[in-house]
Image: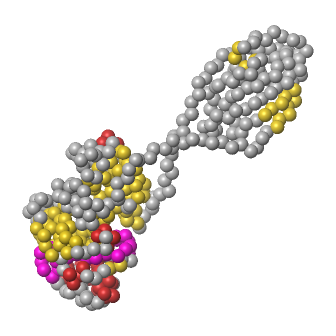
Amino acid sequence: MATYNILVVNNAPGCNDTSVLEQVTATSCTTYIVRLASNSNALGPFSIYVNSSLIGSGYTRTDMFNGVVVSLGCATPTPTPSPTSTPASVTPTQTPTNTVTPTNTASDTPTPTPTVTQTETPTNTPTTTPTNTQTPTNTSTPSDTPTNTPTQTLTQTPTETVTSTPTKTPTNTPTPSDTPTNTPTQTLTQTPTNTETTTPTPTQTPSATPPAPLPAYLFIEPTSANTQFSGYFLSVSSPGVFRGFSNGLALSTNPVTYNVQMNNYIQFSGWGGTAPLIGTGITSSVSSGNDAYGNPITAYLFETYKVSAGTVSGDAWFTWIVPTASTNNQIISQIGYNNAGNPNSLTAVNTQSSIYNLTVTTTGSTIPVGVYRVYSTYTSPTFRINGATNDIYFKGNTLI
Protein backbone atom coordinates (compact mmCIF):
# COMPACT_ATOMS: atom_id res chain seq x y z
CA MET A 1 0.00 0.00 0.00
CA ALA A 2 1.41 3.42 -1.02
CA THR A 3 0.69 6.79 0.57
CA TYR A 4 0.10 9.84 -1.61
CA ASN A 5 -0.17 13.55 -0.82
CA ILE A 6 -2.73 15.25 -3.07
CA LEU A 7 -2.18 19.03 -3.02
CA VAL A 8 -4.41 21.72 -4.56
CA VAL A 9 -2.80 25.18 -4.94
CA ASN A 10 -4.88 28.33 -5.64
CA ASN A 11 -2.79 30.35 -8.12
CA ALA A 12 -5.23 33.30 -8.23
CA PRO A 13 -3.53 36.73 -8.08
CA GLY A 14 -3.38 37.92 -4.47
CA CYS A 15 -3.95 34.46 -2.99
CA ASN A 16 -0.19 33.81 -2.74
CA ASP A 17 -0.55 30.19 -3.86
CA THR A 18 -2.86 29.23 -1.00
CA SER A 19 -2.96 25.45 -0.86
CA VAL A 20 -4.83 22.52 0.67
CA LEU A 21 -3.24 19.07 1.09
CA GLU A 22 -4.92 15.70 1.64
CA GLN A 23 -3.16 12.38 2.31
CA VAL A 24 -4.60 9.20 0.77
CA THR A 25 -3.45 5.62 0.40
CA ALA A 26 -3.81 3.22 -2.52
CA THR A 27 -2.90 -0.46 -2.98
CA SER A 28 -3.37 -0.54 -6.77
CA CYS A 29 -4.32 1.73 -9.66
CA THR A 30 -6.92 4.04 -8.10
CA THR A 31 -8.63 7.23 -9.24
CA TYR A 32 -9.74 10.10 -7.02
CA ILE A 33 -11.97 13.04 -7.94
CA VAL A 34 -10.66 16.34 -6.59
CA ARG A 35 -13.42 18.96 -6.11
CA LEU A 36 -13.91 22.36 -4.50
CA ALA A 37 -16.19 22.37 -1.48
CA SER A 38 -19.69 23.57 -2.39
CA ASN A 39 -19.33 26.63 -0.17
CA SER A 40 -15.87 27.61 -1.46
CA ASN A 41 -15.43 31.10 -2.91
CA ALA A 42 -11.99 30.37 -4.41
CA LEU A 43 -11.67 31.58 -8.03
CA GLY A 44 -8.51 29.87 -9.25
CA PRO A 45 -6.82 29.00 -11.52
CA PHE A 46 -5.65 25.93 -9.62
CA SER A 47 -2.67 23.54 -9.77
CA ILE A 48 -2.82 19.91 -8.57
CA TYR A 49 0.19 17.93 -7.31
CA VAL A 50 0.63 14.33 -6.22
CA ASN A 51 3.54 14.23 -3.75
CA SER A 52 5.93 16.73 -5.41
CA SER A 53 4.86 16.02 -9.01
CA LEU A 54 2.65 18.48 -10.89
CA ILE A 55 -0.42 16.69 -12.30
CA GLY A 56 -1.89 19.75 -14.02
CA SER A 57 -2.41 23.49 -13.72
CA GLY A 58 -4.71 26.19 -15.06
CA TYR A 59 -7.87 24.40 -13.78
CA THR A 60 -10.80 26.84 -13.58
CA ARG A 61 -13.29 27.18 -10.76
CA THR A 62 -15.84 25.34 -12.96
CA ASP A 63 -13.31 22.52 -13.56
CA MET A 64 -12.80 22.16 -9.82
CA PHE A 65 -16.55 22.14 -9.03
CA ASN A 66 -17.09 19.48 -11.70
CA GLY A 67 -14.12 17.51 -10.32
CA VAL A 68 -10.66 16.69 -11.64
CA VAL A 69 -9.78 12.98 -11.85
CA VAL A 70 -6.39 12.06 -10.35
CA SER A 71 -4.97 8.57 -10.97
CA LEU A 72 -2.71 7.03 -8.31
CA GLY A 73 -0.41 4.07 -8.97
CA CYS A 74 -1.36 4.02 -12.67
CA ALA A 75 0.54 4.57 -15.93
CA THR A 76 -1.42 7.54 -17.23
CA PRO A 77 -1.04 8.45 -20.92
CA THR A 78 -1.64 12.09 -21.66
CA PRO A 79 -3.54 12.50 -24.95
CA THR A 80 -2.74 15.55 -27.02
CA PRO A 81 -5.12 16.51 -29.83
CA SER A 82 -3.59 16.86 -33.31
CA PRO A 83 -6.49 18.00 -35.46
CA THR A 84 -5.95 18.34 -39.19
CA SER A 85 -8.49 19.87 -41.49
CA THR A 86 -8.35 20.56 -45.20
CA PRO A 87 -10.97 22.15 -47.42
CA ALA A 88 -12.90 19.74 -49.53
CA SER A 89 -14.22 20.23 -53.02
CA VAL A 90 -16.19 17.39 -54.50
CA THR A 91 -17.74 17.72 -57.96
CA PRO A 92 -19.24 14.43 -59.15
CA THR A 93 -18.65 13.97 -62.92
CA GLN A 94 -19.04 10.98 -65.19
CA THR A 95 -15.87 10.62 -67.27
CA PRO A 96 -15.69 8.02 -70.08
CA THR A 97 -12.41 6.18 -69.85
CA ASN A 98 -11.86 5.46 -73.60
CA THR A 99 -8.87 7.75 -73.66
CA VAL A 100 -5.19 7.80 -72.97
CA THR A 101 -5.19 9.95 -69.84
CA PRO A 102 -2.01 10.51 -67.85
CA THR A 103 -3.10 11.83 -64.49
CA ASN A 104 -1.11 13.35 -61.62
CA THR A 105 -3.30 13.45 -58.54
CA ALA A 106 -2.59 14.83 -55.06
CA SER A 107 -4.96 13.42 -52.51
CA ASP A 108 -5.32 12.29 -48.96
CA THR A 109 -5.73 8.52 -49.25
CA PRO A 110 -7.08 6.13 -46.62
CA THR A 111 -3.92 4.03 -46.62
CA PRO A 112 -1.13 3.95 -44.05
CA THR A 113 1.60 4.37 -46.77
CA PRO A 114 1.79 6.30 -50.05
CA THR A 115 1.51 4.15 -53.21
CA VAL A 116 2.75 4.75 -56.73
CA THR A 117 0.59 2.67 -59.14
CA GLN A 118 1.20 2.08 -62.84
CA THR A 119 -1.88 0.52 -64.47
CA GLU A 120 -2.52 -0.69 -68.01
CA THR A 121 -6.26 -1.05 -68.56
CA PRO A 122 -7.51 -2.39 -71.90
CA THR A 123 -11.19 -1.65 -72.14
CA ASN A 124 -13.60 -0.87 -74.99
CA THR A 125 -16.55 0.32 -72.96
CA PRO A 126 -17.34 3.61 -71.31
CA THR A 127 -17.41 3.28 -67.54
CA THR A 128 -18.00 5.50 -64.58
CA THR A 129 -14.74 5.27 -62.66
CA PRO A 130 -14.37 6.20 -58.97
CA THR A 131 -11.24 8.37 -59.00
CA ASN A 132 -10.36 11.61 -57.32
CA THR A 133 -8.82 13.09 -60.49
CA GLN A 134 -8.21 16.41 -62.15
CA THR A 135 -8.28 15.73 -65.90
CA PRO A 136 -6.19 16.43 -67.89
CA THR A 137 -4.26 19.12 -65.96
CA ASN A 138 -1.62 18.87 -63.23
CA THR A 139 -3.75 20.44 -60.51
CA SER A 140 -3.94 19.40 -56.86
CA THR A 141 -7.42 18.53 -55.68
CA PRO A 142 -7.63 18.61 -51.86
CA SER A 143 -10.17 16.33 -50.28
CA ASP A 144 -11.10 15.55 -46.71
CA THR A 145 -10.68 11.80 -46.38
CA PRO A 146 -10.39 9.78 -43.12
CA THR A 147 -6.95 8.27 -42.72
CA ASN A 148 -5.18 6.08 -40.25
CA THR A 149 -2.68 8.84 -39.48
CA PRO A 150 -3.60 12.53 -39.00
CA THR A 151 -1.08 13.53 -41.72
CA GLN A 152 -1.44 14.80 -45.27
CA THR A 153 0.30 12.32 -47.64
CA LEU A 154 1.07 13.29 -51.21
CA THR A 155 0.51 10.37 -53.55
CA GLN A 156 1.40 10.56 -57.23
CA THR A 157 -0.65 8.05 -59.30
CA PRO A 158 0.18 8.09 -63.03
CA THR A 159 -2.31 5.91 -64.92
CA GLU A 160 -1.83 4.76 -68.52
CA THR A 161 -5.03 3.54 -70.19
CA VAL A 162 -5.13 2.06 -73.70
CA THR A 163 -8.56 2.50 -75.28
CA SER A 164 -10.03 1.84 -78.68
CA THR A 165 -12.31 4.85 -79.03
CA PRO A 166 -11.25 8.47 -78.43
CA THR A 167 -13.63 10.58 -76.41
CA LYS A 168 -14.04 14.25 -75.74
CA THR A 169 -12.73 15.18 -72.34
CA PRO A 170 -13.43 18.57 -70.72
CA THR A 171 -10.29 20.49 -69.77
CA ASN A 172 -9.27 22.71 -66.83
CA THR A 173 -12.05 21.19 -64.72
CA PRO A 174 -11.64 19.33 -61.41
CA THR A 175 -13.54 16.08 -61.95
CA PRO A 176 -13.49 13.87 -58.89
CA SER A 177 -16.24 11.27 -59.12
CA ASP A 178 -17.67 8.96 -56.53
CA THR A 179 -19.27 6.05 -58.45
CA PRO A 180 -18.27 2.41 -57.97
CA THR A 181 -17.35 0.32 -61.01
CA ASN A 182 -16.00 -3.13 -61.64
CA THR A 183 -13.27 -3.06 -64.28
CA PRO A 184 -10.92 -6.03 -64.75
CA THR A 185 -7.36 -4.69 -64.82
CA GLN A 186 -3.84 -5.96 -64.87
CA THR A 187 -1.97 -3.79 -62.41
CA LEU A 188 1.73 -3.51 -61.70
CA THR A 189 2.18 -1.75 -58.36
CA GLN A 190 5.37 -0.43 -56.84
CA THR A 191 4.96 0.55 -53.20
CA PRO A 192 7.73 2.48 -51.42
CA THR A 193 8.02 1.11 -47.90
CA ASN A 194 10.11 3.82 -46.25
CA THR A 195 7.88 6.77 -45.41
CA GLU A 196 8.88 9.46 -42.93
CA THR A 197 5.98 11.42 -41.49
CA THR A 198 6.37 14.42 -39.23
CA THR A 199 3.28 15.31 -37.24
CA PRO A 200 3.40 18.56 -35.24
CA THR A 201 1.60 18.12 -31.92
CA PRO A 202 0.47 21.24 -30.06
CA THR A 203 0.93 20.95 -26.31
CA GLN A 204 -0.15 23.27 -23.55
CA THR A 205 2.76 24.25 -21.32
CA PRO A 206 2.20 26.30 -18.16
CA SER A 207 4.33 29.40 -18.16
CA ALA A 208 5.34 29.11 -14.51
CA THR A 209 5.14 26.31 -11.95
CA PRO A 210 4.90 27.27 -8.28
CA PRO A 211 7.23 25.32 -5.96
CA ALA A 212 5.66 22.17 -4.55
CA PRO A 213 4.83 22.47 -0.83
CA LEU A 214 6.69 20.35 1.70
CA PRO A 215 4.84 18.14 4.24
CA ALA A 216 4.60 18.15 8.04
CA TYR A 217 2.69 15.37 9.83
CA LEU A 218 0.50 15.68 12.96
CA PHE A 219 -0.06 12.60 15.18
CA ILE A 220 -2.96 12.80 17.65
CA GLU A 221 -2.80 10.22 20.49
CA PRO A 222 -5.96 10.11 22.67
CA THR A 223 -5.15 9.52 26.34
CA SER A 224 -8.15 7.15 26.38
CA ALA A 225 -6.20 4.81 24.05
CA ASN A 226 -3.21 4.35 26.41
CA THR A 227 -4.04 0.67 26.92
CA GLN A 228 -4.10 -0.03 23.18
CA PHE A 229 -0.78 1.81 22.67
CA SER A 230 0.85 -0.09 25.54
CA GLY A 231 -0.36 -3.45 24.20
CA TYR A 232 0.87 -2.59 20.70
CA PHE A 233 4.39 -1.67 21.88
CA LEU A 234 4.58 -4.93 23.85
CA SER A 235 3.39 -6.93 20.82
CA VAL A 236 6.21 -5.60 18.63
CA SER A 237 8.80 -6.06 21.41
CA SER A 238 9.68 -2.37 21.39
CA PRO A 239 12.89 -1.70 23.36
CA GLY A 240 12.96 0.50 26.48
CA VAL A 241 9.92 1.63 28.47
CA PHE A 242 8.27 4.09 26.07
CA ARG A 243 4.68 3.00 25.33
CA GLY A 244 3.27 6.18 23.79
CA PHE A 245 3.04 9.67 25.28
CA SER A 246 -0.18 8.94 27.21
CA ASN A 247 1.51 6.30 29.36
CA GLY A 248 3.98 8.83 30.82
CA LEU A 249 7.09 6.70 30.25
CA ALA A 250 10.23 8.33 28.93
CA LEU A 251 11.63 8.10 25.43
CA SER A 252 15.17 6.75 25.20
CA THR A 253 18.02 9.25 24.79
CA ASN A 254 20.09 6.59 23.01
CA PRO A 255 19.88 7.41 19.28
CA VAL A 256 19.56 3.77 18.17
CA THR A 257 16.88 2.86 20.72
CA TYR A 258 15.05 6.16 20.12
CA ASN A 259 14.97 5.46 16.37
CA VAL A 260 13.31 2.06 16.97
CA GLN A 261 10.82 3.47 19.50
CA MET A 262 9.68 6.30 17.22
CA ASN A 263 9.48 3.99 14.18
CA ASN A 264 7.19 1.73 16.22
CA TYR A 265 5.11 4.78 17.25
CA ILE A 266 4.74 5.97 13.65
CA GLN A 267 3.78 2.44 12.48
CA PHE A 268 1.07 2.02 15.18
CA SER A 269 -1.71 0.01 13.56
CA GLY A 270 -4.55 2.10 15.01
CA TRP A 271 -4.11 5.43 13.22
CA GLY A 272 -7.48 6.15 11.61
CA GLY A 273 -9.21 3.77 14.05
CA THR A 274 -8.21 3.80 17.71
CA ALA A 275 -6.62 7.21 17.09
CA PRO A 276 -7.50 9.89 14.48
CA LEU A 277 -6.00 9.81 11.01
CA ILE A 278 -2.54 11.37 10.67
CA GLY A 279 -2.88 15.02 9.66
CA THR A 280 -0.75 16.59 6.93
CA GLY A 281 0.27 20.24 7.07
CA ILE A 282 2.14 22.08 4.34
CA THR A 283 5.39 24.05 4.34
CA SER A 284 6.56 26.59 1.77
CA SER A 285 10.19 26.90 0.68
CA VAL A 286 9.76 30.67 0.24
CA SER A 287 8.49 33.45 2.51
CA SER A 288 5.64 35.15 0.65
CA GLY A 289 2.17 36.43 1.53
CA ASN A 290 -0.27 34.90 4.00
CA ASP A 291 -1.60 31.38 4.44
CA ALA A 292 -5.25 30.29 4.27
CA TYR A 293 -5.90 31.67 7.79
CA GLY A 294 -4.29 35.07 7.20
CA ASN A 295 -1.00 34.38 8.98
CA PRO A 296 2.34 35.21 7.31
CA ILE A 297 4.00 32.39 5.35
CA THR A 298 7.59 31.82 6.53
CA ALA A 299 9.93 29.60 4.55
CA TYR A 300 10.47 26.12 6.09
CA LEU A 301 7.91 26.63 8.89
CA PHE A 302 4.64 24.75 8.43
CA GLU A 303 1.61 26.96 7.75
CA THR A 304 -1.43 27.34 10.02
CA TYR A 305 -3.12 23.95 10.49
CA LYS A 306 -6.64 23.42 11.87
CA VAL A 307 -7.83 20.46 13.98
CA SER A 308 -11.63 20.60 13.95
CA ALA A 309 -13.50 20.43 17.24
CA GLY A 310 -14.56 16.87 18.03
CA THR A 311 -11.69 15.21 16.17
CA VAL A 312 -11.00 13.70 19.59
CA SER A 313 -13.61 13.54 22.34
CA GLY A 314 -11.24 14.34 25.20
CA ASP A 315 -7.58 14.89 26.03
CA ALA A 316 -4.95 13.88 23.48
CA TRP A 317 -1.22 14.39 22.88
CA PHE A 318 -0.51 16.40 19.71
CA THR A 319 2.92 15.60 18.20
CA TRP A 320 4.43 17.02 14.99
CA ILE A 321 6.80 14.76 13.02
CA VAL A 322 8.47 16.74 10.21
CA PRO A 323 10.96 15.71 7.48
CA THR A 324 14.33 17.42 7.86
CA ALA A 325 13.98 18.46 4.20
CA SER A 326 10.83 20.44 5.06
CA THR A 327 12.84 22.62 7.47
CA ASN A 328 15.91 22.90 5.21
CA ASN A 329 17.80 20.83 7.86
CA GLN A 330 16.95 23.38 10.56
CA ILE A 331 15.04 22.71 13.81
CA ILE A 332 11.63 24.04 14.86
CA SER A 333 12.32 25.28 18.40
CA GLN A 334 8.87 26.88 18.89
CA ILE A 335 5.36 26.10 17.67
CA GLY A 336 2.44 28.51 17.93
CA TYR A 337 -0.94 27.14 18.99
CA ASN A 338 -4.46 28.22 20.02
CA ASN A 339 -7.05 25.90 21.57
CA ALA A 340 -9.86 28.49 21.72
CA GLY A 341 -10.79 28.49 18.02
CA ASN A 342 -8.79 31.61 17.01
CA PRO A 343 -6.19 31.04 14.25
CA ASN A 344 -4.83 34.59 14.53
CA SER A 345 -4.01 34.56 18.24
CA LEU A 346 -1.32 31.90 18.54
CA THR A 347 0.84 31.35 21.62
CA ALA A 348 4.44 30.30 20.93
CA VAL A 349 5.67 27.40 23.10
CA ASN A 350 9.07 25.70 23.24
CA THR A 351 9.43 22.18 21.88
CA GLN A 352 11.46 19.62 23.85
CA SER A 353 15.15 19.77 22.86
CA SER A 354 15.95 16.28 24.20
CA ILE A 355 13.50 14.96 21.59
CA TYR A 356 14.16 17.20 18.59
CA ASN A 357 17.95 16.83 18.88
CA LEU A 358 17.56 13.18 17.78
CA THR A 359 16.33 12.01 14.39
CA VAL A 360 14.26 9.06 13.24
CA THR A 361 14.70 7.36 9.85
CA THR A 362 11.36 5.83 8.89
CA THR A 363 11.23 2.32 7.47
CA GLY A 364 7.50 1.65 7.07
CA SER A 365 4.75 2.98 4.80
CA THR A 366 2.65 5.09 7.21
CA ILE A 367 4.48 8.22 6.06
CA PRO A 368 7.07 8.46 3.25
CA VAL A 369 10.46 6.94 4.03
CA GLY A 370 12.94 9.61 5.09
CA VAL A 371 14.72 11.37 7.96
CA TYR A 372 12.45 13.16 10.45
CA ARG A 373 12.54 15.14 13.71
CA VAL A 374 9.85 14.89 16.39
CA TYR A 375 8.41 18.09 17.93
CA SER A 376 6.54 17.77 21.25
CA THR A 377 6.30 19.51 24.63
CA TYR A 378 6.50 16.09 26.37
CA THR A 379 6.89 15.74 29.31
CA SER A 380 5.39 19.22 29.74
CA PRO A 381 1.60 18.80 29.21
CA THR A 382 1.18 21.93 27.04
CA PHE A 383 0.40 19.85 23.92
CA ARG A 384 -1.91 17.50 25.83
CA ILE A 385 -5.06 19.31 24.74
CA ASN A 386 -8.80 18.63 25.01
CA GLY A 387 -10.16 18.73 21.47
CA ALA A 388 -13.85 18.09 22.17
CA THR A 389 -15.21 21.66 22.11
CA ASN A 390 -13.04 24.12 20.17
CA ASP A 391 -11.09 24.13 16.94
CA ILE A 392 -7.34 23.90 17.61
CA TYR A 393 -4.72 25.70 15.47
CA PHE A 394 -0.97 25.07 15.12
CA LYS A 395 1.74 26.91 13.14
CA GLY A 396 5.52 26.61 12.99
CA ASN A 397 6.94 29.62 14.80
CA THR A 398 10.76 29.63 15.16
CA LEU A 399 13.70 27.90 13.42
CA ILE A 400 17.17 27.42 14.85
Q: Is residue 52 magenta?
A: no
In the depicted structure, whether residue 101 falls above or below residue 277: above
Horizontally, is 62 left or right of 108 in the view? left
Residue at the location (85% across, 16% down)?
Answer: 99
Relative to 179, is 332 above or below?
A: below
Determine if the magenta segment contains residue 372: yes
Residue at point 26% right, 52% down? 16
Q: Residue furthest top?
A: 168
What residue appears at the point 41 percent right and 58 percent down from the top-left corner? 53
Query: Where does the C terminus fall, quadrant-wise?
Result: bottom left
Q: Give, as a single range, the part of the protein colored magenta.
A: 364-383
38 and 255: which one is in front?
A: 255
Quarter containing the N terminus: bottom left
With respect to residue 166, does 264 lie above or below?
below
Give residue 348's position: percent from left, percent from top. 13, 70
- The chief SS type of the magenta part is loop
Question: Residue at (28%, 61%) from the top-left corner?
Answer: 286
Is 262 displayed left or right of 56 in the figure? left
Indicate the position of residue 164 as horizontal and vertical percent values: 91, 15
Report x, y in % for residue 32: 37, 53
Percent coordinates x, y for residue 154 in the rendering: 70, 33
Q: How many marks?
A: 0
